[in-house]
């Protein structure tokens, strides 16, 4: 059967070779063509094989369409004809022609089967022509602005979310829902008196549902009412030990209920809490505690050895005693359980100023820094995330991400207005996570990408032992999700994956839902309610459409600065994330990599992340990291560190050839080092500074 053909043309005021730089690179098409979401080259560049691409498209919020296309015609600088491998009646031609005055005529022809349907409705030739004309007009505008360097507009959903939009989101989530009048009054009264702090959130949840489960850990669980009572007793016990409003309290704990109660207790006193990374060294802990003038250290027994360099002026309190190990805190040291048991039940008054939470940056490229987290302004801040991740009241959330990490802390803070039950485990194990989900019927999981990879790496027969059908939402954040992990995880566990891109400094920037990830598995998603994103050049001017630039974010939860007094660059009331990226034609954000990781090799800008994504697709590779190192000839060169799956084999030439077949020559690592595993911090991020030092 023949195709129905639709032909259109337009003129671009740019030379043909500049237009071909985009037209001849299908990887760039999603940046300019709305609805075309993903193009991945399947055949190597350095062979005589015909050119093939895997393509995904999504129109009008419909289903994701997948296809494979091959280049039927490919005349460099002049014409390319793409035809579907699945149905050769679907094809698309682009031909370029000089006008003689420095402009280029772009002729586009679309071939469709006569029986083509969209959402069940047959597409007539006239309808296809109108649709293609609108699409071509937009492509010409975006492409013309890109080639001319014309700044794009800022994007997002507005600087402030409207009261109506916030209320609608909170109603849909069940945060604002009818209840017994007396409980509603207690809930609202607690929020009014204590504010939307950790202390206020748990007091409000106790007022609304005192008998509802607040958390479940390895030692059991407690209701919101019990957490409120115990945290009051603990707060009074801490006050007897010298903790008061403004006191600096350091905390190094794994995920368990005592940590939650300690956070609430410190909030009731107005103390400032410094959340320490469980993967830090004794010297790092000492430096950070001294830098922040912490007077009290709350620590699990297993971390007591890390406090060996602290002086006697830092008061120690045990948060979790397992009764084993050579490095326990002194028997004389009080425990939170003992303080709570002997503390007064007398209610406290809200502090004049709420205590601050200080979260450490990841320290993947340097020494961790303290970042002062702002106190939420109200439930509107929760509505931002809830507008893109459909969590509901009464969720049972397995919090696998560490609570000291911004993402684990976000799970706790979101759980308060949702009156969710937090299921906590001190250590992550992939099979135990599946067992816990099945046993406690968890409806949501908060994790970092390496945890999801470990779950997916389990043999299929192991995964099949556990019923995880209760899982509606798997919320990931903390580092990039490789495309292979996105597709593999959703194929195994269903379309439940959500990816939040943010940082300790900006909180959230964008969120990708399952539909976004199916359409474009490497996307960071779209800005949630009340959030703006801008891609800026080296000046404060927005970058042209489709161009890579610095990612800036604006929302109501930007951090208040580092504890050393420094802060991040601000432009257009937006904060620099330290990353570079671009927006596609549909407004999805893509992160190219860290600004400080970009290298210049032989005069070309290279982001290690693009090479890491290619390496992650190799079936023999379990994980990979790429860094830039000085090079006498090229200025800088790439070095790849590759950990193989058990029993797999690869050599340097094969890895280099694979990358060369899919990326430009200057993206090929000059060295490939095979390692048993990559160094990671407690949140699963690869510590590239250790790769550079060669000492881990």
Image: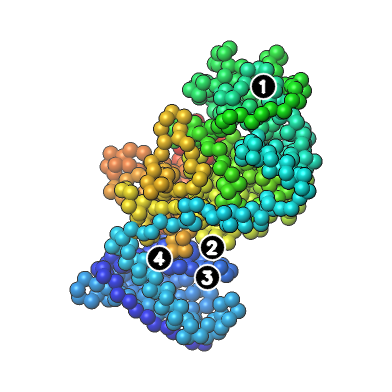
**Which badge, 2 or 4, is on the more N-terminal residue?**
4
C-alpha gap between disc 2 and disc 1: 51 Å
Pointer 2 with pointer 4, Cβ within 8 A = no
Residue shown at the point (71%, 33%) measured from the top left: 257
In the figure, 194 relative to 3: above or below? above
Q: Give the SS element for disc 2.
A: helix
Name the residue that disc number 4 marks. 32
- Closer to the camera, 410 or 458? 410
Q: Badge 3 local density, few (<14 within 10 Å), some, or many (20+)?
A: some
**Which badge, 1 or 4, is on the more N-terminal residue?**
4
- Circle 3 or circle 2, nearest the eye: 3
Label ID, residue 238:
1
C-alpha gap between disc 3 and disc 2: 10 Å
Name the residue that disc number 3 marks. 59
Residue shown at the point (41%, 53%) measured from the top left: 534
Name the residue that disc number 2 marks. 519
Q: Position of residue 408 (x, y in %)?
A: 61, 40
C-alpha gap between disc 1 and disc 4: 59 Å
Position of residue 167 in the picture relative to residue 690 (left or right) = right
Position of residue 460 in the picture relative to residue 245 (left or right) = right
Which residue in the rendered view is the most extreme toward the left? 101
Q: Give the SS element for disc 4.
A: loop
**Which badge, 2 or 1, is on the more N-terminal residue?**
1
Position of residue 148 in the picture relative to residue 127 (left or right) = left
Q: Position of residue 592 (x, y in %)?
A: 43, 51
In the figure, 192 relative to 693: above or below? below
- Circle 1 or circle 3, nearest the eye: 1
**Which badge, 3 or 2, is on the more N-terminal residue?**
3
């Amino acid at each position: 059967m023949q195709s129905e053909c639709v032909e259109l043309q337009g003129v671009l005021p740019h030379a043909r070779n500049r237009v071909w730089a985009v037209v001849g690179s299908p990887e760039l098409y999603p940046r300019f063509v709305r609805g075309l979401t993903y193009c991945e080259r399947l055949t190597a560049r350095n062979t005589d094989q015909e050119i093939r691409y895997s393509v995904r498209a999504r129109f009008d919020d419909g289903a994701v369409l997948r296809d494979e296309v091959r280049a039927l015609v490919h005349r460099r600088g002049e014409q390319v004809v793409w035809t579907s491998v699945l149905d050769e009646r679907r094809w698309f031609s682009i031909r370029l022609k000089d006008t003689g005055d420095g402009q280029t005529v772009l002729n586009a022809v679309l071939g469709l089967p006569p029986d083509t349907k969209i959402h069940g409705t047959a597409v007539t030739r006239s309808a296809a022509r109108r649709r293609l004309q609108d699409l071509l007009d937009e492509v010409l505008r975006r492409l013309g602005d890109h080639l001319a360097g014309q700044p794009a507009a800022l994007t997002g959903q507005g600087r402030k979310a409207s009261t109506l939009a916030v209320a609608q989101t909170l109603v849909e989530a069940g945060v604002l829902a009818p209840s017994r009048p007396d409980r509603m009054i207690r809930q609202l009264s607690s929020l009014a008196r204590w504010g939307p702090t950790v202390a206020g959130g748990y007091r409000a949840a106790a007022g609304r549902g005192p008998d509802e489960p607040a958390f479940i850990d390895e030692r059991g669980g407690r209701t919101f009412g019990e957490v409120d009572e115990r945290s009051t007793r603990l707060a009074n016990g801490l006050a007897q030990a010298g903790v008061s409003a403004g006191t600096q309290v350091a905390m190094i704990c794994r995920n368990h209920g005592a940590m939650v109660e300690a956070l609430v207790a410190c909030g009731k006193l107005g103390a400032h809490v410094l959340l320490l990374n469980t993967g830090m060294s004794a010297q790092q802990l000492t430096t950070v505690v001294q830098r922040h003038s912490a007077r009290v250290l709350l620590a699990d027994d297993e971390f007591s050895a890390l406090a060996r360099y602290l002086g006697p002026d830092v008061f120690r309190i045990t948060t979790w005693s397992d009764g084993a190990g050579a490095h326990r805190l002194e028997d004389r040291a009080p425990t939170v359980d003992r303080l709570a048991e002997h503390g007064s039940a007398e209610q406290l008054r809200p502090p004049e100023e709420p205590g601050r939470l200080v979260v450490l940056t990841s320290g993947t490229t340097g020494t961790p820094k303290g970042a002062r987290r702002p106190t939420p302004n109200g439930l509107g801040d929760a509505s931002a995330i809830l507008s893109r991740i459909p969590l509901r009241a009464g969720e049972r959330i397995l919090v696998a991400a560490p609570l000291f990490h911004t993402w684990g802390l976000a799970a706790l803070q979101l759980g308060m207005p949702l009156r969710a039950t937090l299921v906590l485990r001190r250590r992550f194990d992939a099979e135990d996570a599946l067992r816990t989900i099945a046993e406690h019927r968890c409806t949501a999981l908060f994790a970092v990408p390496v945890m999801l990879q470990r779950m997916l790496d389990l043999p299929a027969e192991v995964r099949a032992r556990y019923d995880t059908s209760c899982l509606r939402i798997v919320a990931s954040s903390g580092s990039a999700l490789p495309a292979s992990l996105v597709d593999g995880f959703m194929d195994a566990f269903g379309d439940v994956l959500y990816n939040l891109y943010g940082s300790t400094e900006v909180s959230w920037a964008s969120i990708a839902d399952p539909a976004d990830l199916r359409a474009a598995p490497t996307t960071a998603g779209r800005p949630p309610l009340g959030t703006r994103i801008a891609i800026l050049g080296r000046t404060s001017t927005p970058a042209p459409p489709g161009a890579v630039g610095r990612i800036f974010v604006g929302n109501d939860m930007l951090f208040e600065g580092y504890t050393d007094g420094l802060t991040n660059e601000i432009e257009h009331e937006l904060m620099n994330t330290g990353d570079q990226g671009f927006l596609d034609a549909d407004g999805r954000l893509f992160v190219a990599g860290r600004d400080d990781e970009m290298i210049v090799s032989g005069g070309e800008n290279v982001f290690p992340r693009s090479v890491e994504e290619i390496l992650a697709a190799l079936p023999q590779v379990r994980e990979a990291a790429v860094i830039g190192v000085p090079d006498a000839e090229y200025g800088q060169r790439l070095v790849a560190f590759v950990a193989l799956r058990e029993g797999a084999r690869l050599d340097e030439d094969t890895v280099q050839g694979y990358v060369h077949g899919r990326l430009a020559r200057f993206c090929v690592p000059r060295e490939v080092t095979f390692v048993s595993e990559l160094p990671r911090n407690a949140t699963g991020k690869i510590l590239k500074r250790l790769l550079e030092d060669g000492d881990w």
